[in-house]
Amino acid sequence: MRARQHACSHIAPRVLRAGVVTSRALAQLQDYGAEPKFDASDRPPSSGVLGRATWTMLHTTAAYLPEKLQPEEAAGFKDLVSSVVNLYPGDGGRLIQTIFDDPVFRDEFDMTETAEHAQLVVWKLHNAVNAEVWPHKWPFPQFMALSVDLFDLAEGLGKKQMYLANMPPFLRKIVLKELKKRWVLDEGLVEAPLATRDAHNLPPDRTMLGRAFWTYIHTVTMYLRHRPSGRQLASFRAIFSAIYHVHKFSKFCV
């Protein structure tokens, strides 16, 4: 237990001195750019477009979850994330599967019962992917002691990592605050006016989230083999059940 706590316990004074710049780094792994759109200019989707759509779908869904999840909501969220494990094509899919093979992360994922935990699970998953894909662009300042190896689950199975349960309260608060700022519109999940739709940076409006979902769904199904496995078929069906259960009270499904 002491070894696990060590990964976070010495961050406090350094993070508090860092202020706003540090908090931004916590929530933003990669800047999506000025126009994170998913329209005809991004067709057919490249690996970058599919990745951006997938993270938009996962982060935004987690951000709009109710504080305490009902069993069907928790199951819907986990089904949506699991669909990425089972359906995402190519090297990206293999990387996600490797991360989910880590027993600590898998347990953290399975224990999702609140919106905050769901948001942190997606944040950690995104960090774990970028630790493998973009280690040279690691966003956390050195003084935060959040080194890339704490998230490198693909290479460091069973080794020291960032444990969500041991995050210091102030660090947890900063991460959640910045995630909300990045993924949640102040007025809720509304449709932006036509003149500005898809022509702004995050947080996404309803149209952008819808296009992210459809980009993900269409693309992963096009890369399935002719006879998908039973697990893949179950994950495909679960996507639509997840949309209903997770977004049924948001304006996304109106």
Image (cartoon, rainbow, N blue to C red):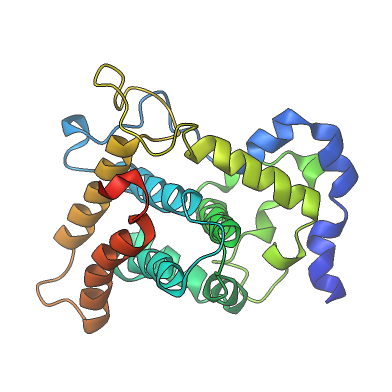
To which quarter of the image does residue 191 belong? top left
Q: Residue at x 56, y 57 (%)?
A: 67
Q: Residue at x 56, y 63 (%)?
A: 68
Name of the residue lying farthest toward the bottom: 230
Q: Is residue 61 visible?
A: yes
To which quarter of the image does residue 165 belong? bottom right
Name of the residue lying farthest toward the top: 195
Residue 125 rendering spot, x and y as whole percentages: 53, 59
Q: Residue at x 66, y 76 (%)?
A: 158
Residue 131 rendering spot, x and y as whole percentages: 57, 53
Residue in the foreground of this view, choosing between 244 and 166? 244
Along the horizontal axis of the image, is 130 left or right of 234?
right
Residue 7 rendering spot, x and y as whole percentages: 79, 61
Q: Residue at x 27, y 44 (%)?
A: 210
Q: Is residue 161 visible?
A: no
Residue in the foreground of this view, choosing between 249 and 148? 249
Residue 219 rendering spot, x and y as whole percentages: 20, 53
Number of residue marks: 0
Name of the residue lying farthest toward the left: 226
222, above or below 32, in the image: below
Quarter holding the N terminus is: bottom right
To which quarter of the image does residue 120 belong? bottom right
Along the horizontal axis of the image, is 102 left or right of 248?
right
Along the horizontal axis of the image, is 38 left or right of 128?
left
185, above or below 173, in the image: above
